[in-house]
Amino acid sequence: MSNVAIIGGTGLTRLEQLEITKREVVHTPYGEPSGTITHGTLCGKNVLFLPRHGAGHTIPPHKINYRANIWALNNLGVERIVAIAAVGAIDSAFVPTSLGIPDQIVDYTWSRKNTFFEEGLDEVVHIDFTYPYDAELRRLLIQACTEAKVDFCDAGTYAAAQGPRLETAAEINRYARDGCTMVGMTGMPEAALARELGMAYATCAVSVNWAAGRSEGEITMAEIQKCLGKGMDNVRAMFERLVPLL
Ligand code: HPA
C-alpha cells in the first residue's frame, strides 16, 4: 500500500513507467472520481495514479469531480499528492516546455464544488491556506528538478482560471498585476480539498504555451501539443529523481 499519489493532467493520462499491480474503482459520497485508480510501482516505489481528466482525457476542467478524486485517494490511505498540471506561462522566465513548482495560488474559478465542509457540520470550518502547497513536497520536487537537470522555476503563483476557454490578453494582464506567473484551469479547488482532508499536496506545473497576449498571435493547439511532448519528457526525467526521494 502506498501513501503517495500522482494526479496526472493534460498530457499525462497514463504513466508509462508505472508497473501496474491493480486497478481500483472507488465510489464516494460525492459521486464518481475521474476514473479508476491505478496501483503500481514506479522506480521501485508503490504509488497510486489518477488521471484528472479521465483515462480518455474527456472531462473538461470545470466538470472534474475534484471532491470525489480527493476523497477517493484519501480513502485509499494516500497522505501525499504530487499533482502534474499543464499551464500557460505569464512570466517571461517560465519558458514553454520548462517545469515550475508554484508556491502560491490565486483562485479565479467559480461555481465549483470547492469544500467538504458544507453539510452536517457541528461547527463551521475554515482551514488555514496561507501557504497552499506542502513545503516538504515542494522541496523534494525542486531537488528532483535540479538533479534531473531540467529547466525549471523554483517558485511561482498559479492563477486558477475557470476555463474551458483560454483567457483574453486583458485577463492575463490582470493576473500578472495580481502577481501570477502561470495560469491553469485545474489547480483549484484540488489543492484546497487536499488541505481540508489533511493531505500534503504540491504541484509540478508544465509550461505548454505563452499565456494569451504574451506572444505574437493566437494560441494554437498545435503549439500546445508540441510543447506538451517535450514538457512531459521533462516530467518523466523529474519523476525518476523524485520517486526515490519520496
Ligand atoms: N491558460 C489556462 N490554462 C492552460 C493554459 C493557458 O494558457 N495552457 C495550458 N493550460
Image (cartoon, rainbow, N blue to C red):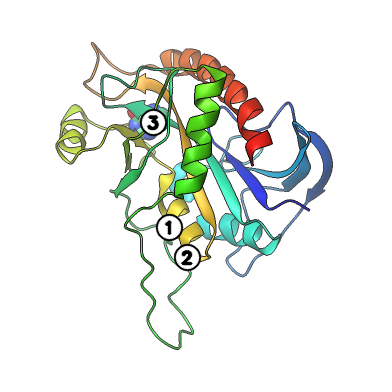
Q: Residue at x 38, y 31 (%)?
A: 154
Residue indicated by mark 2: 196
Q: Is residue 56 in view from this perspective?
A: no
Q: Quadrant of residue 199?
A: bottom right
Q: Give coordinates of residue 77: x percent, y percent.
A: 69, 60
Density class for disc 3 (Cα within 10 Å; few <14, some 14-19, many ≥20) is some
Closer to the eye: label 3 or 1: 3
**Vertical placement of residue 67 versus 55, above or below:** below
Density class for disc 2 (Cα within 10 Å; few <14, some 14-19, many ≥20) is some
Residue type, numbered disc 1 = Ala
Density class for disc 1 (Cα within 10 Å; few <14, some 14-19, many ≥20) is many
Point out which mark residue 192 bears.
1
Q: Residue at x 42, y 45 (%)?
A: 187
Q: Give coordinates of residue 9: x percent, y percent.
A: 54, 36
- Image quadrant of ligand 1? top left
**Vertical placement of residue 63 versus 193, above or below:** above
